[in-house]
Image (tube, rainbow, N blue to C red):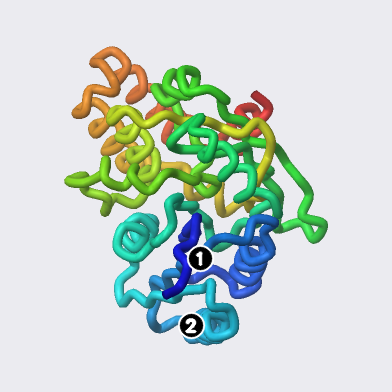
Amino acid sequence: MDKKPKVSVVMACYREPLEYVKTAVDSILNQTYKDFEFLVILNDANNRELYDFLQDLSKRDNRVKLFISNFNLGIASRFIYADLYAKGDYIAIMDADDIAFPDRIEKQVEILEKNIADVVSGWIEEFDDENKDNVVIGIRKVPEKHEDILKFAKRRNPINDPTTMFKRQCLYALKGMSILNHFGLEYMIWVKLMKEGCRFYNIQEPILRFRFNRRTYMRRRGLGIFCEELKVLKFMKDINFLNKEEYYFNLFARFTARVLLSPFIPYIYAILRRR
């Protein structure tokens, strides 16, 4: 019988450039921590380029388990497949176009093993992939301790999603929750876990490199994005994470940022990254 791994890393792919996926995969397979399995979900069965690469990879490295979906389940696929197939005590999230620092998993396992928290994230180093030198353009810092993370979550996502690792039992706290919403889904999940009593911790240094460019800006602006955020805010109000005043304050702030100030979003993000 195969030995059960301590960690299950879960990554979903769709139509990311092959070069990005290769870099992301290498950053996981070359971690200093070795006791893990790597679940990779391809959400586009017709993407022959990614399919051929991942199929070959799964044959060469027995840590890699490939799953093919005929539907694009997006972010939700990571939680669905983790619940169904992950064997590890800890579940680590990875994005297919980011780059994990070599000791990312090692540092997160250390926190979870000490029982400091149930969910651990960390800072991210944002870089501009449109610049050939991949220049660092900022570091997204998030609060360290649970109490401060909880307060921060009232206004913004307090977790850098692609750096997250959590104890397997956290999945049980999500039972009955619809996870088919795409934009803002992870924010909803972290808030739900907070309401269920899970404790959070953020490592106070970058543990992942995150691609940030003009396309990122464009995805985070406009009325459509505001409408998606409205679903997130309503969810937070419905589970009593936000009171009435907090809900309407967030509603006004998000509408202002996403719609009224959308031409200035690049400058707003530049300011927020420095905080």
Frontmost residue, 131 versus 100 = 100
Label 1 packing within 10 angstroms: few (<14), some (14-19), many (20+) = many
Query: For residue 12, which quarter of the picture?
Result: bottom left
Q: Is residue 59 visible?
A: yes
Q: Is residue 158 visible?
A: no
Q: Position of residue 189 (x, y in %)?
A: 34, 41
Mark sitting earlier along the chain (2/1) = 1
Report helix, strand or loop for mark 1.
strand
Which residue is painted at 50% across and 84% down in the image?
55
As drawn, the residue found furthest toward the right would be 133
Give the amino acid type for the residue marked by disc 2 in the picture.
Tyr
Query: For residue 245, which quarter of the picture?
Result: top left
Q: Is residue 182 left or right of residue 16?
A: left
The CA span between labels 2 and 1 is 19 Å
Q: Position of residue 205 (x, y in %)?
A: 69, 35
Label 2 packing within 10 angstroms: few (<14), some (14-19), many (20+) = some
Q: Nearer the viewer, mark 2 or mark 1?
A: 1
Q: Is residue 125 left or right of residue 4?
A: right
Residue corresponding to mark 2: 51
Vertical arrangement, residue 80 with respect to residue 44, above or below: above
Q: Quadrant of the C terminus?
A: top right
Residue corresponding to mark 1: 37
Which residue is painted at 63% across and 48% down in the image?
106
Give the amino acid type for the residue marked by disc 1 in the picture.
Glu
